[in-house]
Amino acid sequence: MKLLIATHNNKKKTELQRILSPLGIEVVTAEDIGCELRDVEETGTTFEENARIKAVAGCEDSGIACIADDSGLCVDYLNGEPGVYSARYSGVHGNDEANIDKLLNNLEGVGRKDRTARFVCAACCAFPDGKVITVRGECEGEILTERHGSGGFGYDPVFMSGGKSFGEITAEEKDAMSHRGKALKLMSEELKKIITE
């Protein structure tokens, strides 16, 4: 089964392929299948709404099942910010360094016990027959005062869970504990039901 992932982020594609390949699912991008996906505006106020907008549009544009996720970092001290605006927190979409800088500036002087946060991932899979599956995964942690490690992407170097930052752990360790890993495992279970029906 081919499953389109509605992203241009190859790291996300690799992560998804690692988790879904045991089901015999081949994860493809629009470029892989020569399809052009329209740019959709993420107008949702929740991760679930944004994931659904992207998945449904990708399914309509490609004609095959499409999975999309919307993920972000929610910091308790900042009332849940950056939340659904995580990728564009600094004002420039996808500028990881600027986003981290803004986050650290906004938490300047905040003590460790008040730096609690969680990564959230809502994943949605839309099918040509109109069926839609949405799942959510979360990973609790805290925001460090400086970057640790050079692995991962996004806020990984400043998010600590289990004693290390996400920038310091292996891909396999991350899959086992991350918000996206948890959401994709739940999605994997839902897709397994569909495949065996």
Image (tube, rainbow, N blue to C red):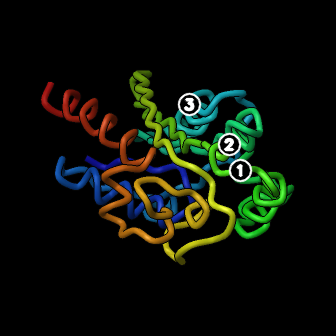
Q: Residue at x 52, y 47 (%)?
A: 141
Q: CA distance from mark 3 to mark 2?
A: 32 Å
Q: Residues within 10 Å of mark 3 (few under 14, many from 20)?
A: many
Q: Residue at x 55, y 44 (%)?
A: 119
Q: Disc 1 or disc 3, which is closer to the eye?
A: 1
| Amino acid identity at mark 1 | Gly
SS at circle 2: helix
SS at circle 1: loop
Q: CA distance from mark 1 to mark 3?
A: 37 Å
Q: Residue beneath label 1, please?
A: 111
Give the mark nearest the N terminus, 1 or 3. Answer: 3
Q: Residue beneath label 2, please?
A: 114
Q: Residues within 10 Å of mark 1 (few under 14, many from 20)?
A: few
130 relative position to 84: left or right:
left
Labels 1 and 2 touching (C-beta < 8 A):
yes
Labels 3 and 2 touching (C-beta < 8 A):
no
| Amino acid identity at mark 3 | Arg
Labels 1 and 3 touching (C-beta < 8 A):
no
